Image: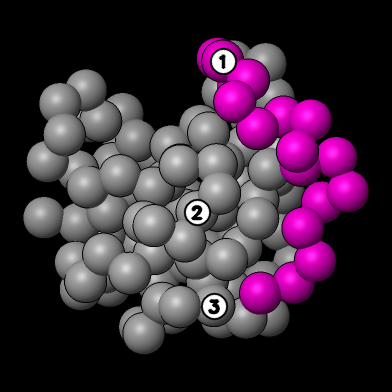
Amino acid sequence: MTYVVTDACIRCKYMDCVEVCPVDCFYEGENMLVINPSECIDCGVCEPECPAEAILPDTESGLEQWLELNTKYSAEWPNLTSKRDTPADADEYKGVENKFDQFFSAEPGEGD
């Protein structure tokens, strides 16, 4: 089992999860984070820290596309080991449906 970041993170990118991760398995895209499933130790401390409820265990049904996306982009985007400021408009996008189709960007973020 591993944890995955879903589209609920897109345009929110709160980064509270990064602060508590003991193995630094978060990677930063332009407008979302992903988890490297090979590095995740399944501790689960990140899940309750996410205000957008974007982090879920991959054992939940229907998360196959998110496992693939997290795997792909964690290999391409830079590692993020410390929390930075949340985007100013994050709360406006919290709870918005179908964010992947509307807002996903494959561009990398800044990382550390």
**Residue 66: image location, x then y, percent:** 34, 35
Which mark is in front, 2 or 1? 2
Q: Give the secondary structure at mark 2.
A: loop
Q: Image point 21% across, 71% down: which residue?
A: 43
In the image, 95 versus 21, the foreground residue is: 95
Q: Is residue 93 one of those drawn in magenta?
A: yes
Q: Does residue 53 sit above or below 24 in this rendering?
A: above
Location of residue 67 by image quarter: top left
**Dot placed on the residue nearer the N-terminal end, 1 or 3:** 3
Give the image location of residue 23, x and y in percent.
35, 83
Q: Residue 97 bears which disc, if any?
A: 1
Identify the magenta region.
83-99
Q: Give amino acid for label 2.
A: Cys
**Total numbered badges shown on the rendered structure:** 3
Q: Nearer the viewer, residue 22 or 47?
A: 47
Q: Main secondary structure of the magenta part?
A: loop
Q: Quadrant of residue 109?
A: bottom right
> Left or right: 89 with respect to 36?
right
Residue under the image location 30 percent in, 44 percent down: 56
Q: Quote the CA–CA distance across marks 2 and 1.
A: 17 Å
